[in-house]
């Protein structure tokens, strides 16, 4: 009878951890691990309001739709800009991975930027609740990232995390299960893509889309001198003639384009270090800076930060997944980690 009850409760009590990111959403199911990793994009019929596609399928539509269809990200700079679309996106993702029935509404733990306001936190809670979650808990992304890479956050030792996502860069020094110093700036991967778009527009008078800029960043993007110059063909629309045009850009040019954005991140790291207690700075000197998030994969960024701060810098093994993995571990051991959860000051729709 006891075994039956345990199985029933596990089936009834679906529990998921969600890394609700500006660029990608990852979902972790308790006991199974990460089961979904999709772009945070929704395509909508503007006439009927019907959702046509979510995730990877919707991302392929970005910049390619006619006037009747809108493909967009409902998240910007780590926060919700379209409540209804986030609700639809979460509902669709959860429906894909959870066998819904009368009792299957999941309990959800969602990782959010540490700098979000109480109103923004409530929007996340309410979106998840409206999407079907019976209870919604929140955790700060730097905490989740630290747990995900196995740092001893409970100890009186300072650990510095720099998590560069699509919409925000999270910089935090963590000790005794809490964030001692925190800096959350809305400068990250999206701003890097936009910088590339602007650079090519101004230098070559060529218009390219965000997805093309992202591919340039991935293939030849860099912020520290490389051993050899890389080249890439880029196709876009000539702003003078309006006709298609192909140009070749180099890694040196992209480094120039990305420099203003990256220096904002470096400056934020320096400010965080200035605001960190001396004893914890000593720990950071010994342990170094841990870089997570997709932005950590930008070539040379770790070397640039090391040069600017004189600190060891480590890009973790799983930078794209560590927030989701950490949120999942917190969910698996919720009693142990309950004190790291964000406490809400206002009621929400979750119950």
Image (tube, rainbow, N blue to C red):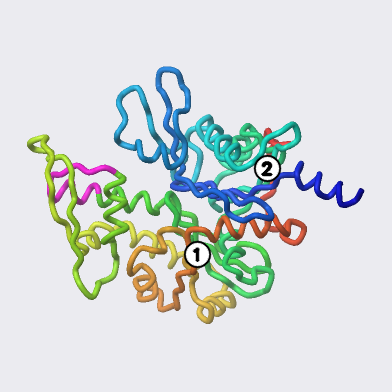
- For the residues labelled 1 and 2, the Cα–Cα distance comes to 26 Å
Residue at the far left: name it: 241
Between 281 and 100, the one lying in front of the other is: 100
Q: Main secondary structure of the magenta part?
A: helix
Q: Quadrant of the C terminus?
A: top right
Q: Secondary structure at mark 1?
A: loop
Residue 28 percent location from the top left of the image: 61, 51
Instruction: Name the residue that disc number 1 marks.
Output: 318
* Residue count near mark 1 (Cα–Cα under 10 Å), binned few <14, some 14–19, many ≥20: some
Name the residue at 67% across, 74% down.
156
Lateral position of residue 96 relative to residue 39, left or right: right
Report the number of discs: 2
Residue 235 percent location from the top left of the image: 18, 46
Check whether the beta carbons of the residues at disc 1 and disc 2 lie within 8 A of each other.
no
Lateral position of residue 238 relative to residue 334, left or right: left
273 to 205, vertically: above or below? below
Residue 246: say if magenta.
Answer: no
Lateral position of residue 18 relative to residue 44, left or right: right
Front disc: 1 or 2: 1
* Residue count near mark 2 (Cα–Cα under 10 Å), binned few <14, some 14–19, many ≥20: many
What range of the chain is rendered magenta? 197-209
Q: Earlier in the sequence, mark 1 or mark 2?
A: 2
Residue 198: say if magenta.
Answer: yes
218 to 174, vertically: above or below? above
Name the residue at 74% across, 31% down.
102
Name the residue at 29% across, 34% down.
64
Residue at the far bottom: name it: 286
Instruction: Name the residue that disc number 2 marks.
Output: 136
Q: Secondary structure at mark 2?
A: strand
Residue 253, picture quadrant: bottom left
Residue at the far right: name it: 1
Name the residue at 60% across, 37% down.
95
């Amino acid at each position: 009878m006891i075994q039956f009850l345990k199985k029933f409760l596990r089936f009834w009590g679906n529990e998921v951890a969600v890394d609700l990111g500006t660029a990608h959403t990852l979902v972790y199911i308790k006991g199974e691990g990460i089961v979904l990793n999709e772009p945070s994009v929704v395509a909508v019929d503007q006439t009927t309001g019907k959702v046509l596609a979510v995730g990877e399928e919707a991302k392929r539509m970005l910049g390619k739709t006619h006037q009747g269809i809108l493909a967009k990200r409902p998240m910007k700079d780590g926060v919700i800009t379209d409540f209804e679309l986030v609700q639809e996106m979460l509902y669709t993702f959860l429906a894909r991975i959870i066998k819904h029935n009368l009792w299957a509404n999941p309990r959800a733990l969602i990782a959010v930027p540490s700098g979000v306001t109480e109103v923004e936190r409530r929007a996340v809670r309410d979106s998840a609740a409206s999407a079907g979650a019976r209870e919604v808990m929140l955790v700060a992304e730097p905490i989740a990232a630290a747990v995900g890479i196995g740092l001893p956050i409970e100890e009186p030792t300072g650990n510095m995390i720099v998590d560069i996502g699509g919409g925000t860069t999270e910089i935090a020094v963590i000790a005794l299960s809490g964030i001692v110093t925190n800096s959350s700036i809305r400068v990250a991967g999206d701003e890097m893509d936009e910088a590339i778009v602007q650079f090519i527009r101004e230098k070559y008078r060529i218009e390219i889309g965000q997805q093309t800029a992202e591919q340039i960043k991935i293939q030849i993007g860099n912020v520290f001198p490389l051993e050899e110059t890389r080249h890439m063909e880029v196709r876009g629309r000539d702003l003078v003639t309006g006709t298609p045009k192909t140009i070749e850009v180099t890694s040196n040019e992209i480094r120039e384009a990305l420099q203003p954005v990256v220096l904002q991140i470096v400056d934020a790291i320096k400010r965080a270090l200035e605001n960190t207690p001396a004893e914890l700075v000593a720990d950071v000197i010994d342990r170094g800076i841990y870089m997570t998030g997709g932005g950590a994969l930008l070539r040379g960024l770790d070397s640039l930060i090391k040069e600017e701060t004189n600190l060891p810098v480590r890009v973790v093994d799983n930078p794209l997944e560590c927030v989701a993995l950490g949120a999942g571990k917190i969910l698996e051991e919720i009693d142990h980690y309950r004190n790291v959860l964000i406490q809400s000051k206002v009621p929400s729709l979750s119950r």
